Image: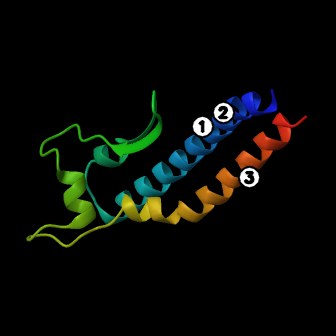
Amino acid sequence: AALDRLGVLAAREAQEVAEETGLRIQHEARARFNRQTSGSGQTAKNITVEETAAGVRVYVKAIRRPANMPIWFDFGTVHMLPRPFFFSSAQLEEAPHRRRMLAALERAAAEASR
């Protein structure tokens, strides 16, 4: 019975951690993008966190043309130096995410064993 509960509890805890990490990445990516550009702010506003059937994801939804603009900013082009904002923000959260996830799974295991 404890193993049955563990799966449900671990999934719930992992989802909460994924959402927190997503929001942290969103916040940092928006701030980085705004510091490096002087546009309308629409691209930064469209760095979103969304819960899907497969879990939580963070992405840049380009609502204007050209749709590849966020990729061009992050990686640069032959005509433009890179202005990293998205993947660098995700990398900053990699180690903290692992720590939060480990703690969440430990909480789930402790709760399941009660």
Quadrant where the image shows the N terminus: top right
Alpha-carbon span between mark 1 and mark 3: 13 Å
The residue shown at (45%, 59%) is 90
In the image, is 11 to the left or to the right of 74? Answer: right
Question: Are discs 1 and 2 less than 8 Å apart at CB?
Answer: yes
**What amino acid is labelled 3 in the image?**
Ala
**What amino acid is labelled 1 in the image?**
Gln
Alpha-carbon span between mark 3 and mark 2: 13 Å
Question: At numbered mark 3, what does the secondary structure look like: helix, strand or loop?
Answer: helix
Which mark is first along the chain, 2 or 3?
2
Q: Is residue 65 above or below residue 92?
A: above
Q: Residues within 10 Å of mark 2 (few under 14, many from 20)?
A: some
Q: Which mark is residue 15?
A: 1
Report which quarter residue 2 is drawn in. Answer: top right
Quadrant where the image shows the C terminus: top right
Alpha-carbon span between mark 1 and mark 2: 5 Å
Residue closest to the far left: 79
In the image, is 78 to the left or to the right of 99? Answer: left
Given residues 106 and 39, the one toward you in this image is 106
Which mark is first along the chain, 3 or 1?
1
The residue shown at (19%, 52%) is 69
Report which residue position mark 3 lands on.
103
Q: Residues within 10 Å of mark 3 (few under 14, many from 20)?
A: some
Query: Residue 106, image x and y in percent?
Result: 77, 49
Given residues 23 and 91, the one toward you in this image is 91
**What amino acid is labelled 2 in the image?**
Arg
Report which residue position mark 2 lands on.
12
Question: At numbered mark 1, what does the secondary structure look like: helix, strand or loop?
Answer: helix
Given residues 101 and 84, the one toward you in this image is 101
In the image, is 113 to the left or to the right of 48? Answer: right
Query: Residue 51, image x and y in percent?
Result: 48, 31
The residue shown at (54%, 51%) is 24
